[in-house]
Amino acid sequence: MAATTTDTGREPGVSGGADRSGGPRRREMSETTLGKVFVAPAILLMALVALFPILYAMVLSLQAYTGRQNQGWAGLDNYVEALTNDRFWTALQFTIVFTVTSVAAEFLIGLGFALLMNQAFRGRGVTRASILVPWVIPTVIAAQMWFFMFNVTPGFINNVFGLGDFSWLGQSGWASFAVIFADVWKTAPFVALLLLAGLQTIPGDVYEGARVDGAGMFQRFWYITLPLLKPAILVALLFRTVEALRVYDLPQVMTGGAFNTESLSILVQQYVVRTPDPGLGSALSTITFIFILGVGMVFVRFLGKELVIGEEGR
Amino acid sequence: MSRKWSRGRWAAAGALSLVAVAACTPGGGDGDGGEGGGEMVWALGGSEAQPGRVHQQVAELWSEQNPDNPIRIEILPDEADQQREQQALELQAEGSNFDVLGVDVIWTGEYSTNGWVESLEDVRAEIEEVSIPGAVESATWGGELWVAPYNSNAGFLYYRTDLIDEPPTTWDELCEMAIEAGQQEDIGGFIGQGSRYEGFVVNWLEYYWSDGGELYNEDQSEVVFDTDTATQVTEWLADAKESGCLAPGFNTATEEEARNLFQSGDAVFMRNWPYAYSLIQDDQQSPVRENFGIAPLPTFSGEGTISALGGFNNAVSAFSDNKEAAKEFVVWAATNEEVQALLATEASVPPTLESVYEDLSDDPVMALLGEVLPEAKPRPPAPQWNNISVEMQRNLFPAYNGEGDPADASQAVQEALEGAVEE
């Protein structure tokens, strides 16, 4: 992006390049072809690494298994089995609740952190570094830590707040709360980091101009910060939503999926590893994949539009 | 590139990628190249497989005595599910990197059905004669011996000698004492493994078995699950939770949470494996280190005791290049007194050789194990055990936590057990 923000960068696209080179058309064509040839090995490698497992899982999802033994083709039986299973819907429900609440909370807290870190004040460097600490801790370790904090034994949280033997992880509702809380603690800094990067691209003179025009603090936030931050917000929400939808480690370590905290990924893991049925497991992971892909596409659509609009508006 | 790939080729590619993964395990894949002789690999996990610990000592002992076929341990992850997955990756690809496999007591059926392990029928008599019956049972599936017993495990009742004079013999008695002493001291009552995982199934089965229930008949061909008994047992546990007999945190506790609670003096009773004994005794900070005792687990009738059997056994991989030597090794590890005694004295890993318990009857843990193990029952080592266990966790766990109906839960368990027989 930064490289193209010259004068000609205003009109992106193929035509700009063609005007500049000004050479004969034939040469232009062959350059594109040559480019494709150069890119081909990389694309092939990526297809092999990224696409092959996905397609292979789809092939597996159409086969019947007893334990790990292949029993031939099954058509769509595995999908029917997955979609008619109560467990799938319970897991989907938890996954969606988890995603919506955790991403919303992470966004609000992350935005607050980002605005704070964007201010010039003494100790800003230390604040930035310390806010990022939770994000640096590996998730499994954070999950184990929060298990100790919430669990009755040793019960750090209960001790601090004088709650006695309140069983956070041992009852419905509160178990989900604890898992979501841990996720927010863990990844709000990540959102803050992405938003901070966005904030720093907003030029200071825009704010100065607004101040001269008599805009208050909230007006500046609402009419300048938010609209200009939109691309960064969408990127942050996209990353977090997609990641939250495939959550595995936090609920697995903290509750083992008890009290309706079983996520889709836990279910997939169970059918691939614990009670092996690679066909059903692959069907579940394909469904999860399509679901996440769909949500991701919606975001990308918005994101693409936003980026274009942002470009024109400048 | 346009060459069409047959299904066989795809399968081969898949298998290749599996081999590649298996070869990525630390230290794996250094082929010895030898046809008959050469170094063998023993794939097992857990803390006692670490350098210097007891399983390593056993391997060294064998290697000293058999310089032509020495054995080396390939250390697998700590968690049982992950060990199983590592072994499955190798065996699914018919890889010969592992010669001897440490097989958990509940995997016997799965491994034999998949054709991953060699039958040990020809050495059965030799092994059966000297081993604990429960351990042999856990090594048998479909009437055939597939693994050689190696180490065993059983549950104990830990109790506070400063609060309880005589350990209870029935579960109801245990609850009365737990509530009374717990209220007096303002501590929790009974702690066990109540979190939603395999350990809960083990605990629940101990209640169920001790009320006279069974899962399968002798040759495991027919379900004899008693839904009434199962419902009663689940209701008892739900009541125990309500009445405060169960310590707070029971339904999120695994072995370690239970031990921590008891060790810090916050519970009257604990159900746990023998490993906790020396850990509590050696903890200078623990207020209970001199005030606790061990007893057999209670039953509902007050007669006898029953415990679920744990531990793991050794199998010969069906894809080993060195099957003869591997078979000799597993038989040696099962029947050699020195090896089996080493397990008990070096690491408090309960051996499977009966005679060791007579020799070590001065040790309180071994003495109690000698009493409890003959009565211990293995979980059925069915190929579908994991499915059954998951269904039991999914249904019985909510039922005892007041989020499901105990009778419905029993029905679901019955169906899961029947589904496993039909397959």
Image (cartoon, rainbow, N blue to C red):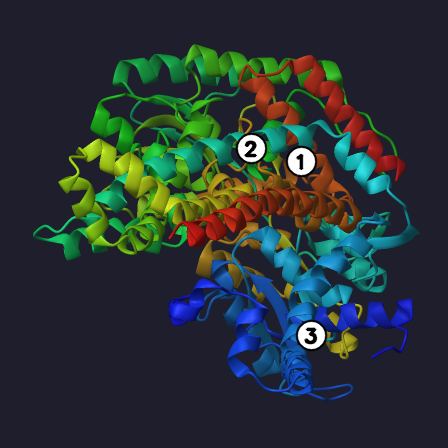
Q: Amino acid type of disc 1?
A: Val
> Is residue A117 toward the left or the right of residue B51 in the image?
left
User: Looking at the image, is mark 1 or mark 2 nearer the viewer?
Assistant: 2
- Within-10-Å neighbours for mark 2: few <14, some 14–19, many 20+: some
- Within-10-Å neighbours for mark 1: few <14, some 14–19, many 20+: many
Query: What's the chain of the residue with tag 3?
Result: A
| Residue sticking out furthest to the left | A122
Q: Secondary structure at mark 2?
A: helix
Query: What's the chain of the residue with tag 1?
Result: B
- Indicate the quadrant where residue B14 lies: bottom right
> Is residue B162 toward the left or the right of residue A286 in the image?
left
Q: Secondary structure at mark 1?
A: helix
Q: Amino acid type of disc 2?
A: Ile
Figure check: A75 above or below A104: below
Badge number at residue B390: 1
- Residue at screen point 38% across, 69% down: A7
Q: Nearer the viewer, residue B334 or B45?
A: B45
Badge number at residue A44: 3
- Residue at screen point 57% across, 16% down: B403
Classify the position of the N terminus of chain A by image quarter.
Answer: bottom left
Q: CA distance from mark 1 to mark 3?
A: 41 Å
Which numbered disc flags the more N-terminal residue, 3 or 2? 3
Q: Amino acid type of disc 3?
A: Leu
Figure check: B247 above or below A181: above
- Residue at screen point 73% across, 77% down: B325
Query: What's the chain of the residue with tag 2?
Result: A
Mark 1 vs mark 2: same chain? no
Residue bearing mark 2: A96
Q: Are marks 3 and 2 in contact (CB under 8 Å)?
A: no
User: Where residue B250 appears, x then y in whole percent?
Assistant: 45, 27
User: Where residue A62 appears, x then y in whole percent?
Assistant: 85, 49
Residue B93 visible at all: yes
